[in-house]
Amino acid sequence: MSSSTQNVSFISASGGTGKTKISLMLAYYLRQMKQDKKVLFMDLDPTAGASLSVFSEEEYEKHINDKKTLSEALDKYITHRTSIRPEDVIVQARIGNMFVDFIIPGEELVEVVNKLWSGSGVAGTRFKKALESFIPFNKYSYVIIDNAPFFDPRYTALSLHISHKIVIPIRPSLVDLKRTIKLYSWLKDETEASEGSKNLINYIYAVFNHVPPHPKQIEHVFVENFLQGKTLNPSSSISSKQYTYLLIRSQQLKNDGVKFINTYMEVSADVERFPLSGKLPDKAEKFIEQVAYKLNLI
C-alpha cells in the first residue's frame, strides 16, 4: 500500500455507537475539503449498513446483481486466483452531496471470510494481499473502512492489516466503556501476534458520541470534564458515584494508550438525517473537523 494513503478503520465494541454514521461523515468531509484528493469508502460490515445508507434500493440491488462487491472479488481471488479489475469491485456512491468511490461488502461476505480464516496462512495477510491485487490504493489519499461491530472479531482483525489508524466511537456509558476495554485488550493481543500490525496499537483513538445535549446530565458533564482533564465539583447535584465509575473506566483506556479525540458529538436529529439531508449539519461538521485534525488527515 502507498505510504501516502491514509487508511482509517472505524470499529466498536457495541452496536449503535454511531460508528457507521461517523465514518460516512468523515468520508464526506474529506471529499468536500480536499476535492483534489480521492476518497475510497470500504464497507466491511456484512450487514451492509453503510451501503444501504448511501444507495437506493434499486442501486444497491443492481450492484449486487452485477457482482460488483468485495465478497465476489475476494472469492474469485481466493478460490480461483482470477484477475480482478478495480472497476469490477469499486462503484460510485453519493454521500450527502458529494461522490466517493465505494466498495459494497456483498451478500456472501460471511462465507468468504470463513474461507479466509479456514485457509492456510494468516487470514489478515491473505486479505491484505488480495485487496492489493485489485484495489489501486496508491490512487487514493484516504481510505475509510467501516467494520462490523465486535460481535464477530474477525472483521476487526482483517481491517488491522490494512489500517494506519483505528477510531473507536464510544457512548458515554459504563457498559460501552467496559466493552471497549475488553476490545482494546483483544487488539493488543492481536497486534502482538500479527507481524503486519505490530505498531498499530500506537494509533488507536477514541471519540465520544451520542452525548446528551443537556449540560446537567451525567453523561454530558462527564465527557466535557474528562476531555478537559477536570474533576467533578463536589457540590454538584450529579451522582459522584456514577461519575467516578465513568472516569475510572475512561482513564483506564487512556492509561493503556488510547488517545482520546478532544471533541464529542451530541445527540442530534439533524445528524441522524445525514447523508439523505445532502449536507453535513453545522454541529456535525465542527465535530468531524476536530476528528480529522486529531487524526492528522487535514
Image (cartoon, helix red, strand yellow):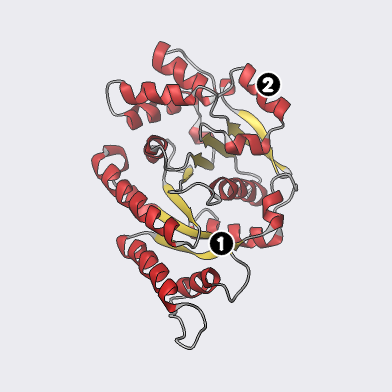
Relative to 247, is 77 above or below? above
> Is residue 140 toward the left or the right of residue 61 in the image?
left
**Residue 62: mark in rendering:** 2
Horizontal and vertical percent position of residue 153:
38, 39
Q: Residue at x 29, y 49 (%)?
A: 188
Using the rendered view, name the quadrant where residue 78 is placed. Answer: top left
Q: Is residue 16 visible?
A: yes
Disc with the residue nearer the chain's start (2 vs 1): 2
Horizontal and vertical percent position of residue 179:
39, 53
- Of labels 2 and 1, the one closer to you: 2
Relative to 228, is 134 above or below? above
The reply to whether discs 2 and 1 touch (Cβ–Cβ < 8 Å) is no
Horizontal and vertical percent position of residue 10:
48, 46
Q: CA distance from mark 2 to mark 1?
A: 36 Å
**Residue 179: mark in rendering:** none
Of residues 173 and 292, the one nearer the viewer is: 173
Q: Residue at x 31, y 47 (%)?
A: 186
User: How many C-alpha atoms fall within 10 Å of the one at disc 2: few (<14), some, or many (≥20)?
Assistant: few
Q: Residue at x 43, y 48 (%)?
A: 13
Amino acid type, mark 1? Gln
Q: Which element is circle 1 on?
A: helix
- Residue lying at the far left in this picture: please name it: 193
- Which quarter of the figure is the N terminus placed in? top left
Reading the image, the residue beneath label 1 is 290
Amino acid type, mark 2? Lys
Of residues 7 and 206, the one nearer the viewer is: 206
Q: Which element is circle 2 on?
A: helix
